[in-house]
Every structure is written in C-alpha cells, then in structure tokens.
Amino acid sequence: MTTAQSRSKSGHPRLGKYWDSLKFALYCMTHPLDGFWDLTHEKRGTMAAANTILILSLVVRILKLRYTSFIVMQVYWEDLNIFLYLASILLPLGLWVIGNWALTTLFDGKGRLGQVYMATCYALTPYPLIQFPLMILSNGFTKDEMQFYSVLSMLSLIYTVILIITAMGQIHEYGVGKNLLFTVATLFAMLVMIFLMMIFFSMISQGVSYFISLAREMLFRM
Amino acid sequence: MKRWKITGTVLALAGMLLCTPGTAEAEETSYTYNYDYWGDVQYSPDLYSVSKVFTSSDLGLEQKMVSPSGLYVYKDLIYVCDSGNNRILEIKRHSAEALDVTRIIDGFQGDVDVTTFSNPTDVAVSEEGCFFIADQGNARILKLDPDLNYLMQFDKPVDNTLDPAVAFQPNKITIDTADRVYCIATGINKGLIKYESDGTFSGFVGATKVTYDWTDYIWKRLATQEQRTQMESFVPTEYDNIYMDYEGFIYACTGAVSSDDLRSGQADAVRKLNLMGNDILVRNGEWPVYGDLYLNGSGGGYEGPSYFSDVTVMENDIYVCLDRNRGRLFGYDDQGRMVFAFGGNGNMDGYFRKPVALEHIGHELYVLDTLDCAITTFVPTEFGNLVYSAIELFDQGKYEESGEAWKRVMALNGNYDLAYIGIGRALLRQEKYKEAMEYFEIKYDDENYSKAFKQYRKEWVEEHIVWIIVVILLLFLIPLGIGKIRALKHEIDTDEYFQMQEKKL
C-alpha cells in the first residue's frame, strides 16, 4: 500500500521504491528484529538506500570535524588526511562485511555478501541521525554541560553496534547464541585479515626495495 | 603520460632548487620559543637578551672562581658562593652591565674552632642582614651577623631515622621572615629539614610522595637479593634547590626524576610548598610544568628530560626554572602556563655549560654557570617588558590596559597563545563576551570560552525571550491545530448528513 502511495507522489516507480526503502531504515531502527527480517526476506531494502545511508554517515563524520564545538573536538588540521579519516570507517566496514560473509557462508548463513553489506549499512542509520543534531547542539553547550554530549554520542554508537549485531542474526537466520558467537568470530577474522594485509604489504615493500637496491648496485658497477 | 612525468621531474627539481634556501632557514632554531596548544614548538621573539657575561676577570678577582654553586640576592647585593675557593663574594649591582665585587668573605670572628668555610654551597641573608651559610665541608649551617660575627650554628638534626655515622652535608638553604631555616641536605630524602630560629630541629617538610605500581612490587618480590640491590629503591626523590618567594611559599625543584614519572604525572619537577609542606602549585596550563616537552630526545649534547637545578620567583608570580641539562630557562605564570623558554648548551653569550643557580632583581635574571665560572645577566627586551606589563596590569585589575598591552604583544608575535588568551580574558572582564569567545576559540581555551559563552548565552536568551516563546508556542500550536483541522475534516467526511446527501446524488 505504501508503495502505491509514494508511486502516486513521485510519479516514478524506481524513485518511489528507493524512497520507500530509505524510509524503511527508520523502521529497522525502531523495530530491529522485524525490520531486518523483512529487509532481505521481503526485499524491502535496496542497495541504493544502503549506499545513501553509508554516504550520509561519512558526510556527517566529516562535517563533525568542522562544526562540532571545539570543546569536545579539537582537530589538528595540519595532520588531517581526509581519505585516511574516511578509511577509518570504510576499512572496518569492508573487513566486517567480508569477514562476516566468509564465516557465515560456511555455517548455514542465509545472507549473501551484498545482503550483509546492505544490512550493515542500514544498521548505521542512528549514527547520522543522532550525530548530526548533536553536532549542531554541541555549539550551545559549555564545558560543564558537555556530559550530555558525550552520553548521547556514546548512545548513538552503542545503538549502532546493537543494530549491526541484530541485523546479522536476522539475515543469516541465526539464534541469539550463534549470532553472538559469530560476531566474536567475525571480529577475530577482521584481526586475521589485518595481520595478513600487514604481512603482505611489508613483504611487497621489502621485495621492491630489494630490486631497487639490486638495480642501484648494477648501475653503480656499470 | 610521458610528458607529464618529464614536467613533473622538472617541477620537482625547480621546487628543490627554490626550496633549498627556504628549508635551511626553517631549520635554524630560534633562541626563544614556546609551546602551543598542540605541544608544537613556536618560535618567538626574545623576551630576554644577554646584558653581559661576568667572568672572574670581568669582576676584577685576583683569584679566579672555582666551581661556584650558590647565588643569593639581597637588595642590590648579589652573593656568590665560590665553593672551590671556600669563600663568598659580595657583589654590588650598579646596573645589569656593571657589577663590582665589594667584599670577599672567607672567614668570620667568633668563639668556635673553625672560623673559615669549607665548601660553602649556599648563602641566604635575612631582613636584618644576617648571613646564613651552608658550610657543607664543616657539616653546619652558620648564622653570622652583618659584621661577620658568629651568632649560632645549625647542626645535624637529631632524629631516629637518620644514620648517626653519615656526615651532615647541607646543600641548599633558604630562610623565612622569622629566620627559620629550611635546608636540603645531601643524602636526606625525607624532605626539607626545618629549623626554628633558635636552632632546634622541628621536622621534615614537603617530602615527595613515593610512587610505585603493583608490577614493580611483584618484580621486587620475585627478584633475588642481588637483583633487588640493582633495582631502584622506592625512596622519595631529593630536591635540588629551593626558593622562598615574597609571600613565604617555598618553591622546590628537582631534576632527579625519570621521564616516565614526569609523563604519567607521578613526579613533579617543581613544587610550591605551603607551611604544611603540601604542594599548592597551580597547574592549569595545557602542558605540565617540566620544561621541554620532548623528554627522550637526545643530541645537542643532552639527553632525557629537563633537569631543574634552580628556580626563582618574581614579584608578578612568574617563576623561572633553570634547566641544567639543556642550559635553558623556562618561565611559567601563576597558572602554570609557559611564558617563555630560551637558551641552550654552548659557549656563546646566553648559552651555558652547566648552569646551577638563578636569581632575579626586578625583572632581570642572573644565572651562575659552575663550569664557565661566570654570571650571565639577562635584561628583558621590549617584547619581554610588554608581556610583563600585560600580566601585571591584569593582576592590578586594569583589564582594558592589559588587553591593549596583549594586543601589542600579539602584533609582535602572532604565535603567542598567552596573548590571545590574555586579550580574551581582558574582554571577558569588560563584558564583551562575543569577542572574548573568538579569541578563546582560536587558542582552544575551553575553560574561559565556557565562562564567556555562558554569559553570552544568558544575554542572548534575555534579548530574544519573546521570539523563543513564540517559536515554542508555534511548535505546540501548529501540530495541535493540524490535528484539530483533520478531526474536523474527518467529522465532516463521515457525517451522516453529508453521507445522505451523497447517497441522494
């Protein structure tokens, strides 16, 4: 019924579907068990909406740098690399999605890689939704009142984490115990992946430097 | 692609050529510097310049000074402990550029066995002009009258905890207005030895607290006897020097602290002791009071943290610490924020090899170097005087003038955090909250910013109270109104009368 309504509003079926799936993120936030089940099983979520939520989170994270009151956030601009800063969200997200999929696919997880990504992005909704108003409000607080800020900010993060865990349980059709077990296992998988990446990069850089020094030596002798 | 690479290389080469003189300039370190909010070094114009360096020959001494160690200022007289020659020099200051030796004190009259000094390490002079001399080699603190007649002496304190076999070695002394003597003695780490004016020992004050964590404790339990003796023992650190300020508080400094303890806040390089021996030094600065922030850097002839060998307190509550390790002077204001840092190791004027004692007359600073056997006199520059006048004007309650002075300071040094905060504080006192907030925000002073913002917010709310109420009312009334209209519409839609009409049609 809602689809029909929005179709009549926007007049464009795909746009209407996108708008509906974006609004569905709010439903997931307030009814996580029901919402994340419907997200994949009833195909209520779209990739476009998931990307939008992720981009919104990234934008809010960057905006926070500039517009949060300096009392809670002091930015050393000289050392700030915006791409590294974004990677601080994107890299753990990527590792989480890949790690979670790689593990659950071996243990009857029903979610596919794309669905894991979509559900995780949907679970990020509270972050921009709470952090953005909080960012504006922070400019109206004095140092003593900043306790409100830190509590609310912490709440948004805890909320997000809880949503991610529930989302994984719903899309893989896991029970509570199995879900928690695989959450811990995914975290461990992320560590393993970081470890492998570090070994890989250090090996590559050593290999490259070996050939460079070899070439130097040859040039020197010739 | 290829052309891009070539232009890139050309550009890089050109850049290197252009930048070379620039980088060379940037590497040249400035004599005076300060730390900003982030702990980065910010070069600064000099607050002090060397007026003159007085060696033994400049002072006209026949016998050259040998490892002098103590310095004391009494009115316009400077007393120097020429420890190696067992004498004390009395020097009259005509100006910072003219010092004259007026008296060489190498003995006294009195009814005691030894009427000469042996390795005198420190001297203090009371209001009435009586001398107090730490006569280390003779294990006593002497009290002499202005004409050098023996009055009394302070001996090793009688205390159960002190080993009677170990010789008493008074090292540094200071006296209060009631002629009570506070003494640092080598090998006694229970704090400062306090004597009453009649010579009786009245206790130890201001011992540093012993700190160790449970890992240390477990290691100690596991270690063998030999290993245990190799380890550091948990004893309080000894102070290196003391200074009695004009209010009667004792500033004590120590250099024998590890960088780890300094960083974790378990040890202090400087303390301000009240009568009870408690530390009341204000530490509101962004960075702790321990000199250079980079503790583990080596090179430039030094290693490890700053080693404070002396401290002096000016009448405007700015205290200056002397770093023996790096040959530097660090000034801090009454809030514990760094006012200046300058100096270095070396042989040029204004650089030191092993500075041990520091004194001040007015705003001038006098530094005694025990290896160079020389006194260096520093006078404040125009910039230094401006900074001092800004601070003093604020303390006197002349906020507007203080703000003006800070503005001139800022014009001379735009990287000086204290100037911005100073202007902000002056504006805050003048109730110009909005402007004050801007200055505090630039230098991340959240404490003062919050003070200003609180007032600003209050004013803003008072001015706009009507609008705020209107907005709040609208926020309530509009949804309420919409609800009412909808209900009305629903009623009309479902009303039997209209239904009937529809049916009829």
Image (cartoon, coloured by chain):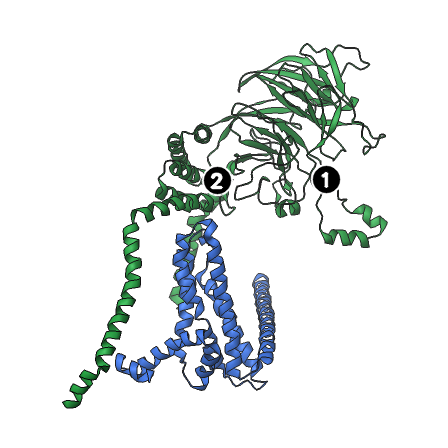
Chain colours: A blue, B green
Q: Is residue A51 left or right of residue B336?
A: left
Looking at marks 1 and 2 on the same chain, the residue that comes earlier in the sequence is marked by: 2
Q: Nearer the viewer, mark 1 or mark 2?
A: 1
Element assignment for label 1: loop
Q: Distance from label 1 to label 2 (Cα)?
A: 36 Å
Element assignment for label 2: strand
Task: Give the residue pinned by disc 1.
Answer: B236
Query: Badge 2 sits on which subunit?
Result: B
Q: Quadrant of the N terminus of chain B?
A: bottom left
For the question of whether residue B482 can be seen, the reply is: yes
Crowd class of label 2 (few under 14; some 14 to 19; many from 20; radius 10 Å)? some
Both labels 1 and 2 in a single chain: yes
Query: Badge 1 sits on which subunit?
Result: B
Residue visible at 69% across and 14% down?
A: B105
Q: Which mark is residue B43?
A: 2
Residue visible at 57% across and 87% down?
A: A108
Q: Quadrant of residue B106?
A: top right
**Mark 2: amino acid:** Tyr
Q: Viewer-proximal residue, B454 or B424?
A: B454
Q: Is residue B400 left or right of residue B44?
A: left
Q: Position of residue B460 (x, y in %)?
A: 33, 47
Q: Viewer-proximal residue, B221 or A83?
A: B221
Q: Which mark is residue A129?
A: none
